[in-house]
Image (spheres, helix red, strand yellow):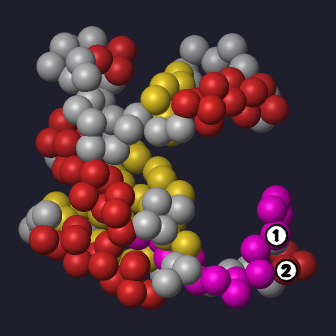
Amino acid sequence: MLCTDGSESVVEALPTNLYLNGLEGSSVIRTGELIWGHALVGTEDAQWNSGRKIDVVLGADLTYDSAGFPALISTFNELIGLNPEVKILITATVRNERTFKRFVETCSKRGLVVKMMEWEVPHPGKQMGPFYDGAVPIRICDIRREGEGG
């Protein structure tokens, strides 16, 4: 597993996060910086990512600023190019419907389909972990190339 972020301070904090979740010293989890729109350096090497394919990409709160969409979607397309079977799942906190719609449209223009997955916010008494009141919608999105299964 590769945990990434584009912020140097967040990347530096990832080992602490792993420690707090009882995952320190794991030989399975690695951390690193990933900046949207920048080439995934070293992917031409068979040992990139320790020779493992990227099967699943999980992202959260990535669609808040339309200025970042071209770089984000370029990275999605590069990851799909490395492994066409990769599953890209993101959660999109929809602070502004127009911005989210622009994300979906930009994906479409770049050959990607955004499929919304259905889910309901659990009743507050049944939630575990951080509380989410549901006032701001969150969409779970399955992103893939046009014409591919799902």
Residue 41 sits in which quadrant? top left
Q: Are marks 1 and 2 in contact (CB under 8 Å)?
A: yes
Residue drawn 48% across the image and 26% down it: 32
Where residue 31 appears, x then y in whole percent? 53, 25
Residue under label 2: 124
Specify the principal SS of the magenta part.
loop
Q: Amino acid at mark 2?
A: Pro
Q: Is residue 114 above or below residue 35?
A: below
Image-quadrant location for residue 48 = top left
Q: Is residue 136 left or right of residue 74?
A: right
- Quadrant showing the C terminus: bottom left
Q: Which residue is mark 1?
A: 131
Q: Which residues are magenta?
A: 128-141
Distance Cα–Cα, label 1 vs label 2: 7 Å
Question: Circle 2: is it few (<14), some (14-19), or many (20+) Cα within 10 Å?
Answer: few
The residue drawn where x is 70% and y is 87% is 135
